[in-house]
Image (cartoon, rainbow, N blue to C red):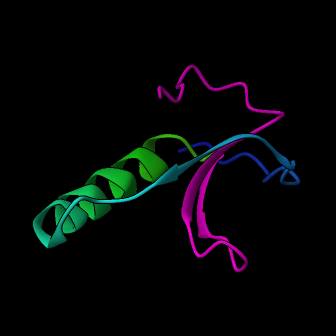
Amino acid sequence: MIEYPGSASARALLAYAIAAKNAHDEDRMGHAIHKILEEDRSLRFYRDAQTKEFLLAAAASSTSKSSLAA
């Protein structure tokens, strides 16, 4: 296995606020987000302290083929 050194994280270029409609969807959404983050290390998932929203953000320096769709 080849490992490459990590890169400095860039500030987010694009972020989407996401929310589940109900508790069942929230559980499913959590599993899906975990899977997405494993596949694309350039994405970040975090909670904004001011708005209390959960955000999925793509880094500006991302060279990944993954994209976020609204």
Seen at 60% across and 67% down, the residue is: 46
Seen at 56% across and 67% down, the residue is: 53
- Magenta residues span 42-70
Q: Tell whether 7 sits left or right of 19.
A: right
64 within the magenta span: yes
**Vertical arrangement, residue 1 with respect to residue 52, above or below:** above
Q: Please state the horizontal and vertical placement of residue 58, each as a whole percent of the image.
A: 67, 40
Seen at 19% across and 68% down, the residue is: 27
**Vertical arrangement, residue 50 with respect to residue 26, above or below:** below
Q: How many marks?
A: 0
Residue reaching furthest to the bottom: 49
**Vertical arrangement, residue 30 with respect to residue 38, above or below:** below
Q: Dividing the picture into quarters, in which one does residue 25 lie?
A: bottom left
Q: Please state the horizontal and vertical placement of residue 44, each as a whole percent of the image.
A: 62, 55
Q: Please state the horizontal and vertical placement of residue 62, each as a whole percent of the image.
A: 74, 32
53 within the magenta span: yes
Q: Dividing the picture into quarters, in which one does residue 8 lie?
A: bottom right
Seen at 57% across and 19% down, the residue is: 65
Q: Tell whether 62 sits left or right of 23.
A: right
Q: Tell whether 67 sits left or right of 50.
A: left
